[in-house]
Amino acid sequence: MRAVGRVLGVALILVLVMAAAVPLLPARLLLAWQPEQALLRLVSAHGSLASGQGLLSVGSGRLARTIPGPLSWQWRLAPWPQLELGHVWLEQPVRVQAGLQGWSLSGQTLNLPASVLGRLHPLLQTVQPLGELSLRWPSQALGSATGAVLELDWRAARSALSGDAELGHYQLAVSRQGSGLQLSLRTLSGDLTLAGQGQWTTGGLRFDGKARPARADDGRFTELLAVLGPQSQGVTHWRIATTTTTQE
């Protein structure tokens, strides 16, 4: 029994030593632990797993580009284990925190240029979106199966294909639906009406949208609508679809 007790004691010490050493491991290990198809990826990392910073890229495949400003992270253990993330696009740091009910994410607002949208899909790259994006999400439990995830506002929306003409103000709402996400796009104001519905699951994204000028004789959006997709009875139908390996 004494021998078993000594073995268990040594094993416990080893576990504690390893737990204490993990936060001191180099941050570059994070580069190897990322999902291969992630739209947001670390491309460089400095410091340690407990405290460091690195540059991010946003986009899919060859469309990916590094965004300005480093992402910083800091692990804290009191009063609960939590990860604090900071970036120049964030109004305040974001906290991912453990609690009695599991892990939770603090609410926050992220402001960024609309040109980032062009990095997510070839169709959006062709459209060349301009304007400002405001991404907001409420405090939420990460393990929840229902509820709002985020809202994305595209203000002073423009496209390089429509010259100086302002398209409008649009909002994309994202909510949980089972194991995937439900997406809904609506127009809040503007001369070009956009609407659509979609789902994002482990198999990829499928989003079907419609576009229509507020005035049928408005020729400012002719080139943009021709790129988006086919037209029928004054309505342009467009689609964004991806799988884990391809985009269409």
Image (cartoon, rainbow, N blue to C red):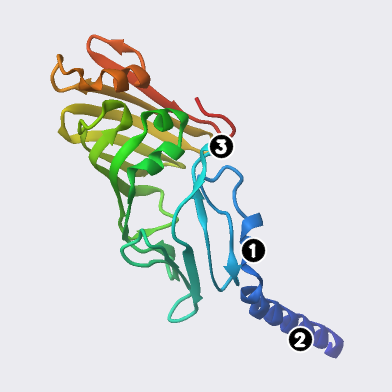
Q: Quadrant of residue 124?
A: top left
Q: CA distance from mark 2 to mark 1?
A: 33 Å
Picture layout, residue 163 above or below residue 177: above
How many numbered circles are shown? 3
The residue at the far front in this view is 163
Mark 3 touches mark 1? (CB < 8 Å): no
Q: CA distance from mark 3 to mark 2?
A: 52 Å
Q: Residue at x 54, y 46 (%)?
A: 38
Which residue is tagged 3? 62
Q: CA distance from mark 3 to mark 1?
A: 22 Å
Mark 2 touches mark 1? (CB < 8 Å): no
The residue carrying pointer 1 sits among few (fewer than 14), some (14 to 19) or many (20 or more) residues within 10 Å by Cα, namely: some
Picture layout, residue 101 above or below residue 231: below
Q: Nearer the viewer, residue 9 or 242?
A: 242
Side of 91 where 12 appears, left or right: right
Number of the label disc, if any, that sits on residue 28: 1
Side of 126 where 171 appears, left or right: left
N-terminal of the pair, mark 2 or mark 1, is: 2
**Residue 109 picture location, percent across and down:** 30, 57
User: Considering the numbered disc 2 on the image, is that residue within a helix, a strand or a loop?
Assistant: helix
N-terminal of the pair, mark 3 or mark 2, is: 2
Q: Residue at x 64, y 80 (%)?
A: 20
The residue at the far bottom in this view is 2
Residue type indicated by callout 2:
Gly
Which residue is tagged 2? 9
The residue carrying pointer 2 sits among few (fewer than 14), some (14 to 19) or many (20 or more) residues within 10 Å by Cα, namely: few
User: Considering the numbered disc 3 on the image, is that residue within a helix, a strand or a loop?
Assistant: helix
